[in-house]
Image (tube, rainbow, N blue to C red):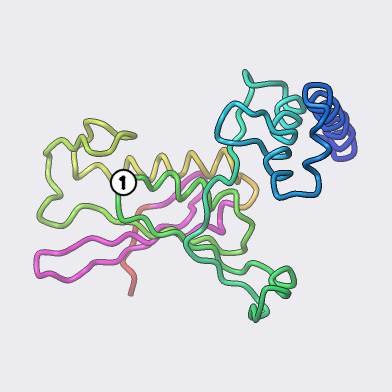
Amino acid sequence: MDGIGDHQRFLGAFRGAFEERLAAEPEVLARYSGSDWTRVMLGGRDDYPGILPTAALAYSGGAEVCSNHPQWYTLDLLLVAPPFKNKTEYWQTRSLVAIEHENGDDVETEMWKLAHWRAPLSVCVFYDFSEKRLDDKVYNGDPTLPGVERRHWLTRKLDLLSDIVRRVDAETPERHLLIIGNRMEDGSIRWRSSTWNGDGFGEPVEIT
């Protein structure tokens, strides 16, 4: 990727995709003034190829290299400043904190989103097994970590999350904060945190 060169390559791909759609559907310009134009540009759930997905694939080298995913994922919580007051001012804000909460096993998706989202602080909250279940029994409920002993699940999960950050956000890994909860024998919740430590997330420490 080289800035202006990338711009020119994408513009060429965009022009080609538009002309390809116009040749395949000469009447497409009649749809410009209606709400259906979004479908022309982005495509639909069927086999109708949108202009922008076609251009994006052509720019990137084709479906063998990457894939398009319209409207992919949202954030659980975003703190912005100055305070957002109405729809006309959202674009005047800047992101301060991006937060994801995962109550199941798929922490990787949440970390992937946070690694891509630009915010000075990224917080991912998730949960380890309860104290009485931290044993040697094999857990097969997590498709990403099949056959892992429950007492080793968190360590393995931290390795995966570290790998995501290394691949996606190697420039600013220190902005990511993990908060890990688990239920104790007395019914209380133990909270620990993990921060970036050199080349990965460090051993979780008690939040005091």
* Relative horizontal placement of residue 169, taking residue 38 as reference (left or right): left
Residue occupying the far top of the picture: 64
Residue at (62%, 26%) from the top-left corner?
66
Camera-nearest residue between 145 and 23: 23
Q: Position of residue 45 (x, y in %)?
A: 55, 35
Region in magenta:
173-202
Vertical arrangement, residue 141 with respect to residue 189, above or below: above
* Relative horizontal placement of residue 146, taking residue 188 as reference (left or right): right
- Label 1 sits on what residue type? Asp
Vertical arrangement, residue 78 with respect to residue 53, above or below: below
Camera-nearest residue between 196 and 48: 48
Q: Position of residue 133 (x, y in %)?
A: 12, 50
* Relative horizontal placement of residue 125, taking residue 114 as reference (left or right): left
Vertical arrangement, residue 176 with respect to residue 187, above or below: above
Quarter of the image with the C terminus in it: bottom left
Residue at (73%, 32%) from the top-left corner?
56
Where disc 1 sits, the SS reads: loop
Camera-nearest residue between 83 and 206: 83
Residue 121 in the magenta stretch? The answer is no
